[in-house]
Amino acid sequence: MERKKLFIILAVVALLVTTLFPFPASAAGTVKWNVKNASTEKVTIRLWGPATYSLDAKKNGASKFDVVPGKYNYSMKVCGATINGEIEIARAAKPFKIPKCASLIVNNQTGGGMTINLTGPASYNLSFSSGKTTKTVLSGSYSYTAYGCGGSSMSGKIVVKGKKNWTFWCN
Protein backbone atom coordinates (compact mmCIF):
# COMPACT_ATOMS: atom_id res chain seq x y z
CA MET A 1 0.00 0.00 0.00
CA GLU A 2 2.87 2.40 0.84
CA ARG A 3 4.43 1.84 -2.61
CA LYS A 4 1.15 2.68 -4.30
CA LYS A 5 0.84 5.97 -2.33
CA LEU A 6 4.46 6.86 -3.13
CA PHE A 7 3.90 6.15 -6.83
CA ILE A 8 0.74 8.32 -6.91
CA ILE A 9 2.52 11.17 -5.09
CA LEU A 10 5.48 11.02 -7.53
CA ALA A 11 3.13 10.93 -10.52
CA VAL A 12 1.22 13.99 -9.26
CA VAL A 13 4.47 15.89 -8.58
CA ALA A 14 5.82 15.00 -12.05
CA LEU A 15 2.58 16.19 -13.66
CA LEU A 16 2.68 19.46 -11.73
CA VAL A 17 6.34 20.09 -12.57
CA THR A 18 5.85 19.47 -16.31
CA THR A 19 2.72 21.65 -16.32
CA LEU A 20 4.30 24.54 -14.45
CA PHE A 21 7.75 24.25 -16.06
CA PRO A 22 7.32 22.80 -19.56
CA PHE A 23 10.40 21.39 -21.22
CA PRO A 24 11.57 23.15 -24.39
CA ALA A 25 10.91 21.40 -27.67
CA SER A 26 13.51 18.73 -28.24
CA ALA A 27 15.92 19.03 -31.14
CA ALA A 28 14.24 15.99 -32.70
CA GLY A 29 10.93 17.92 -32.86
CA THR A 30 12.40 20.98 -34.59
CA VAL A 31 13.60 22.00 -38.02
CA LYS A 32 16.29 24.46 -39.05
CA TRP A 33 14.63 27.70 -40.14
CA ASN A 34 16.91 29.76 -42.41
CA VAL A 35 16.56 33.53 -42.38
CA LYS A 36 18.38 35.80 -44.84
CA ASN A 37 18.49 39.37 -43.61
CA ALA A 38 19.36 41.82 -46.40
CA SER A 39 18.85 44.87 -44.17
CA THR A 40 21.65 46.72 -42.44
CA GLU A 41 20.11 46.22 -39.01
CA LYS A 42 19.57 43.34 -36.62
CA VAL A 43 15.91 42.33 -36.87
CA THR A 44 13.89 40.66 -34.13
CA ILE A 45 11.27 38.31 -35.54
CA ARG A 46 8.42 37.34 -33.24
CA LEU A 47 6.66 34.06 -34.08
CA TRP A 48 3.56 32.58 -32.51
CA GLY A 49 1.79 29.39 -33.51
CA PRO A 50 2.74 25.86 -32.46
CA ALA A 51 5.36 27.58 -30.26
CA THR A 52 6.33 31.17 -29.44
CA TYR A 53 9.71 32.64 -30.34
CA SER A 54 11.56 35.95 -30.34
CA LEU A 55 14.52 35.49 -32.70
CA ASP A 56 17.28 37.94 -33.61
CA ALA A 57 18.39 37.76 -37.24
CA LYS A 58 21.87 39.22 -37.67
CA LYS A 59 22.26 42.15 -40.04
CA ASN A 60 23.44 41.60 -43.61
CA GLY A 61 23.61 37.84 -43.27
CA ALA A 62 22.07 34.45 -42.72
CA SER A 63 20.83 33.06 -39.42
CA LYS A 64 19.56 29.59 -38.55
CA PHE A 65 17.11 28.80 -35.79
CA ASP A 66 15.69 25.57 -34.37
CA VAL A 67 11.92 25.95 -34.64
CA VAL A 68 8.99 23.59 -34.13
CA PRO A 69 7.49 23.12 -37.63
CA GLY A 70 4.02 24.48 -38.38
CA LYS A 71 2.03 27.54 -39.39
CA TYR A 72 3.03 30.77 -37.62
CA ASN A 73 2.03 34.41 -37.47
CA TYR A 74 5.03 36.71 -37.45
CA SER A 75 5.84 40.33 -36.71
CA MET A 76 9.08 42.22 -37.22
CA LYS A 77 10.22 45.80 -37.34
CA VAL A 78 12.61 46.57 -40.16
CA CYS A 79 13.54 49.79 -41.97
CA GLY A 80 11.18 51.79 -39.76
CA ALA A 81 8.14 49.67 -40.62
CA THR A 82 6.34 46.87 -38.80
CA ILE A 83 5.69 43.88 -41.04
CA ASN A 84 3.16 41.22 -40.09
CA GLY A 85 2.28 38.02 -41.89
CA GLU A 86 1.88 34.27 -41.85
CA ILE A 87 4.46 31.64 -42.70
CA GLU A 88 4.61 27.86 -42.88
CA ILE A 89 7.87 26.58 -41.41
CA ALA A 90 8.77 23.07 -42.56
CA ARG A 91 11.83 20.99 -43.31
CA ALA A 92 13.54 22.09 -46.56
CA ALA A 93 11.50 25.33 -46.77
CA LYS A 94 12.89 28.24 -48.77
CA PRO A 95 14.80 30.75 -46.65
CA PHE A 96 12.74 33.54 -45.12
CA LYS A 97 13.95 36.84 -46.61
CA ILE A 98 14.09 40.14 -44.80
CA PRO A 99 14.23 42.93 -47.41
CA LYS A 100 16.85 45.63 -47.89
CA CYS A 101 16.52 49.10 -46.47
CA ALA A 102 16.95 52.21 -48.59
CA SER A 103 17.77 55.81 -47.72
CA LEU A 104 15.24 58.43 -48.75
CA ILE A 105 17.03 61.80 -48.70
CA VAL A 106 14.52 64.64 -48.90
CA ASN A 107 15.70 68.18 -49.55
CA ASN A 108 12.74 70.27 -48.39
CA GLN A 109 13.06 73.70 -50.01
CA THR A 110 9.37 74.62 -49.50
CA GLY A 111 10.07 77.12 -46.74
CA GLY A 112 7.98 75.11 -44.25
CA GLY A 113 7.21 71.65 -43.04
CA MET A 114 5.93 68.92 -45.32
CA THR A 115 4.75 65.31 -45.16
CA ILE A 116 5.03 62.42 -47.56
CA ASN A 117 2.79 59.35 -47.40
CA LEU A 118 4.28 56.24 -49.03
CA THR A 119 2.35 53.05 -49.84
CA GLY A 120 4.18 50.00 -51.19
CA PRO A 121 6.20 47.26 -49.54
CA ALA A 122 5.30 49.10 -46.30
CA SER A 123 3.31 52.22 -45.43
CA TYR A 124 4.97 55.36 -44.12
CA ASN A 125 3.73 58.78 -43.03
CA LEU A 126 6.92 60.85 -42.98
CA SER A 127 7.35 64.45 -41.78
CA PHE A 128 10.13 66.77 -42.92
CA SER A 129 11.26 70.17 -41.70
CA SER A 130 13.20 72.55 -43.94
CA GLY A 131 16.54 71.35 -45.27
CA LYS A 132 17.89 67.85 -45.93
CA THR A 133 16.56 64.90 -43.92
CA THR A 134 17.32 61.19 -44.40
CA LYS A 135 14.71 58.53 -43.58
CA THR A 136 15.13 54.77 -43.80
CA VAL A 137 12.42 52.84 -45.68
CA LEU A 138 12.05 49.39 -47.22
CA SER A 139 13.55 49.22 -50.67
CA GLY A 140 10.92 49.03 -53.43
CA SER A 141 8.25 50.78 -55.50
CA TYR A 142 5.81 53.15 -53.81
CA SER A 143 2.81 55.30 -54.54
CA TYR A 144 3.23 58.65 -52.81
CA THR A 145 1.35 61.77 -51.88
CA ALA A 146 3.40 64.77 -50.75
CA TYR A 147 1.79 67.64 -48.82
CA GLY A 148 3.32 71.09 -48.34
CA CYS A 149 3.42 74.63 -49.73
CA GLY A 150 0.41 75.79 -47.69
CA GLY A 151 -1.80 72.77 -48.32
CA SER A 152 -0.80 71.78 -51.86
CA SER A 153 -0.30 68.14 -52.71
CA MET A 154 1.16 66.04 -55.49
CA SER A 155 0.95 62.31 -56.10
CA GLY A 156 2.76 59.76 -58.18
CA LYS A 157 5.01 56.73 -58.13
CA ILE A 158 8.60 56.43 -56.98
CA VAL A 159 11.19 53.64 -56.74
CA VAL A 160 13.42 53.83 -53.68
CA LYS A 161 16.58 51.70 -53.84
CA GLY A 162 19.95 52.33 -52.26
CA LYS A 163 19.90 56.11 -51.84
CA LYS A 164 17.15 58.21 -53.38
CA ASN A 165 17.53 61.99 -53.41
CA TRP A 166 14.29 63.95 -53.72
CA THR A 167 13.96 67.75 -53.73
CA PHE A 168 10.73 69.69 -53.13
CA TRP A 169 10.05 73.41 -53.57
CA CYS A 170 7.02 75.66 -53.98
CA ASN A 171 6.23 77.53 -57.22
Image (cartoon, grey):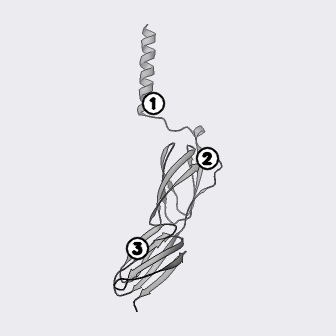
For label 2, count other residues whose C-alpha is less than 10 Å away and answer few (under 14), some (14-19) or many (20+).
some
First reached walking from the N terminus: tag 1 or tag 2: 1
The N terminus lies in which quarter of the figure? top left
The kind of residue tagged 3 is: Leu
Judging depth in this view, the residue of 118 and 18 nearest the camera is 118
As helix, strand or loop, the secondary structure at mark 2 comes to: loop
Mark 3 crowd level (few <14, some 14–19, many ≥20, 10 Å Cα): few
- Residue nearest the observer in this picture, 92 or 168: 168
Which corner quadrant holds the C terminus?
Answer: bottom left
Q: Residue 86, how many percent across, how many down?
A: 53, 53
Pointer 1 residue: 18
Q: Nearer the viewer, residue 102 or 121?
A: 121
76, above or below 90, in the image: below
The x, y position of residue 27, in whole percent, is 58, 40
Residue positioned most to the bottom: 171
Q: Position of residue 150 (x, y in %)?
A: 33, 85
- Residue pointed to by mark 3: 126
Label 3's element?
strand
Give the residue drawn at x 58%, y 48%: 89
| Real-space Cα separation, disc 3 to disc 1, in angstroms | 49 Å
- The three-letter code of the residue at mark 1 reads Thr
Identify the disc placed on residue 90.
Answer: 2
